[in-house]
Image (cartoon, rainbow, N blue to C red):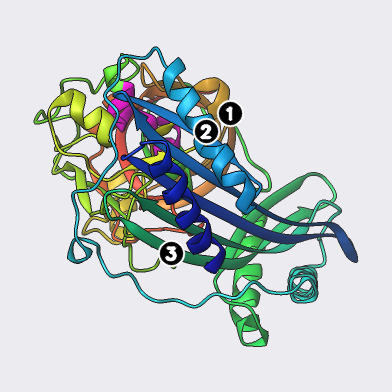
């Protein structure tokens, strides 16, 4: 971004003119475009581009912030002035940190993937192609069947007074197909995605996905109820991903320090079954949006958060790491006026069992394929959850009849300890700077509230 190179020089001059020797300039830009279908036409279309320039400086030991969306040369001096005034108003007793402790060799080399945002016409055509494919897959398609195509691109630049000058631009695209089937008595749906692959050569893959979601919706017809009791439960990868997403913040050191996570003081302790290893990996090979530095310019790295059941680390930025007397894990996030924490590709590592072996080990129980209401039915601080669910019976190690309207209740931290087996397929979708994934997992003897 040539414009950024011009602006950073103006910022440097303006900062030094005010006697500011420690400062940082951070730029982020996001572009997105998407289209959705309903019946025979495009029902929604959106396109957006947004960027923000963030400036931080240290004045008299205090950190000052200012931001702008106006990338004008004249705005840069005002940006520095606002941040300096902001620093004088800061009352928080928090050490100001501008990172400068890395060399070029400390940063992981990520794949140089060239991504070009598709045109509106391409997005429209991809969405309609998906629509044609899903409707051709089954005659029972009902209104509510939806398809869509989307693309996004993110650009990040970071420059500071300590010699850092970093940048990356990455993107991804994809389609989704959601089938709503009507058999005359009830309606059922299923959905799936295809990522990073536009063009006619993806038609065969889309047809396969359409057949998969039709089969998934069809299997749900005639769902019955289950009796209240304890069951061997297999959570499918989508539901375990939702579980991890809901409780991800408990792994953030800043939340532990605020008393918002039960993992405070637990590093080095066993908090999960020995078959559980959870990794946070900025360089997950199937993710096209890998990033070699965090929101503070610290080199990112792959690390096991839980290893064979033992909590090895929380996720840190520079400030939270300083408070605990440890090194940052390179997990800083950025917003207009603050630095927080985020994960990258955060996932439960696959086990050694095939899916068939996992079901055979379960014997009899319930396969949970739908959970809804995590926003209301889960407490990220305590780990407690009570979620309305649906899925299938497991009978003699095989998937049996569909079941619905039962509640899965428990505690996330206890669930991690009770997982007894994991299948060998890691499902990671929705590529981005942050994504979450999991294989299917088996939890014996869970409480289920049914009829």
Q: Which of the two discs, 3 and 1, sits closer to the camera?
A: 3
Of residue 437 and residue 365, the one placed in the foreground of this image is: 437
Q: Is 332 rendered above or below residue 350? A: above
**Residue at horizontal 49 percent and vertical 66 percent from the top:** 170
Q: Is residue 246 magenta?
A: yes
Q: Secondary structure at mark 3?
A: strand
- Residue 382 falls left or right of residue 269: right
Q: Are marks 3 and 1 in contact (CB under 8 Å)?
A: no
Q: Which mark is residue 81?
A: 2
Find the magenta span and give its range.
243-255
Instruction: Say few, some or many: other residues with alpha carbon within 10 Å of mark 3 (under 14 / 14 to 19 / 20 or more).
Output: some
Q: Position of residue 98 (x, y in %)?
A: 29, 39
Q: Position of residue 99 (x, y in %)?
A: 26, 43
Q: Is residue 398 magenta?
A: no
- Residue 309 falls left or right of residue 131: left
User: Which residue ends up furthest to the left in the rendered image?
Assistant: 268
Residue where numbered disc 3 is placed: 168
Q: Tag 3 or tag 2, which sits nearer the N-term?
A: 2
Of residue 449 and residue 64, the one placed in the foreground of this image is: 64
Q: Tag 1 or tag 3, which sits nearer the N-term?
A: 3
**Residue at horizontal 66 percent and vertical 83 percent from the top:** 199
Q: Residue 120: which quarter of the image?
A: bottom right
Q: Secondary structure at mark 1?
A: loop
Q: Which mark is residue 199?
A: none
Overall secondary structure of the magenta section: helix
Is residue 3 at all visible to an observer of this figure?
Answer: yes
Q: Which mark is residue 373?
A: 1
Instruction: Say few, some or many: other residues with alpha carbon within 10 Å of mark 2 (under 14 / 14 to 19 / 20 or more).
Output: some
């Amino acid at each position: 971004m040539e414009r950024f190179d011009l602006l950073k020089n103006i910022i440097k001059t303006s900062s030094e003119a005010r006697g500011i020797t420690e400062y940082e300039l951070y730029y982020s830009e996001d572009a997105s475009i998407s289209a959705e279908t309903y019946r025979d036409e495009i029902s929604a279309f959106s396109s957006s581009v947004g960027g923000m320039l963030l400036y931080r400086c240290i004045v008299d030991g205090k950190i000052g912030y200012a931001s702008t969306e106006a990338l004008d040369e004249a705005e840069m001096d005002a940006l520095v002035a606002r941040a300096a005034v902001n620093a004088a108003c800061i009352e928080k007793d928090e050490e100001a940190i501008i990172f400068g402790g890395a060399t070029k060799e400390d940063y992981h080399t990520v794949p140089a993937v060239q991504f070009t945002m598709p045109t509106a016409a391409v997005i429209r055509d991809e969405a309609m192609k998906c629509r044609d494919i899903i409707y051709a897959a089954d005659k029972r398609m009902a209104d509510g069947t939806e398809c869509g195509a989307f693309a996004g691109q993110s650009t990040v630049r970071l420059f500071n007074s300590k010699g850092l000058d970093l940048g990356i631009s990455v993107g991804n695209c994809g389609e989704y197909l959601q089938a709503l089937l009507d058999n005359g008595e009830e309606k059922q749906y299923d959905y799936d995605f295809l990522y990073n692959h536009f063009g006619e050569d993806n038609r065969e893959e889309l047809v396969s996905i359409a057949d998969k979601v039709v089969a998934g919706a069809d299997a749900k017809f005639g769902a019955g109820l289950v009796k209240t009791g304890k069951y061997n439960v297999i959570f499918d990868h989508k539901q375990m991903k939702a579980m991890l997403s809901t409780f991800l913040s408990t792994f953030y050191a800043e939340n532990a320090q605020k008393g918002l996570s039960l993992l405070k003081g637990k590093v080095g302790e066993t908090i999960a079954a020995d078959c559980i290893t959870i990794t946070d990996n900025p360089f997950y090979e199937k993710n096209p949006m890998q990033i070699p530095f965090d929101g503070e310019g610290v080199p990112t790295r792959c690390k096991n958060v839980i290893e064979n059941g033992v909590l090895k680390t929380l996720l840190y930025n520079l400030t939270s790491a300083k408070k605990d007397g440890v090194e940052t894990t390179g997990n800083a996030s950025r917003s207009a006026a603050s630095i927080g924490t985020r994960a990258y590709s955060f996932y439960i590592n696959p086990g050694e069992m095939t899916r068939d072996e996992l079901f055979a080990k379960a014997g009899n129980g319930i396969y949970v394929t739908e959970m809804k209401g995590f926003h209301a039915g889960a407490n990220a601080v305590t780990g407690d959850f009570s979620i309305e669910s649906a899925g299938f019976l497991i009978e003699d190690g095989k998937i049996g009849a569909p079941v619905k309207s039962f509640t899965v209740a428990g505690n996330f931290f206890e669930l991690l300890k009770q997982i007894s087996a994991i299948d060998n397929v890691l499902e990671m979708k929705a590529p981005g700077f942050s994504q979450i994934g999991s294989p299917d997992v088996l939890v014996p003897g869970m409480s289920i509230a049914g009829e």
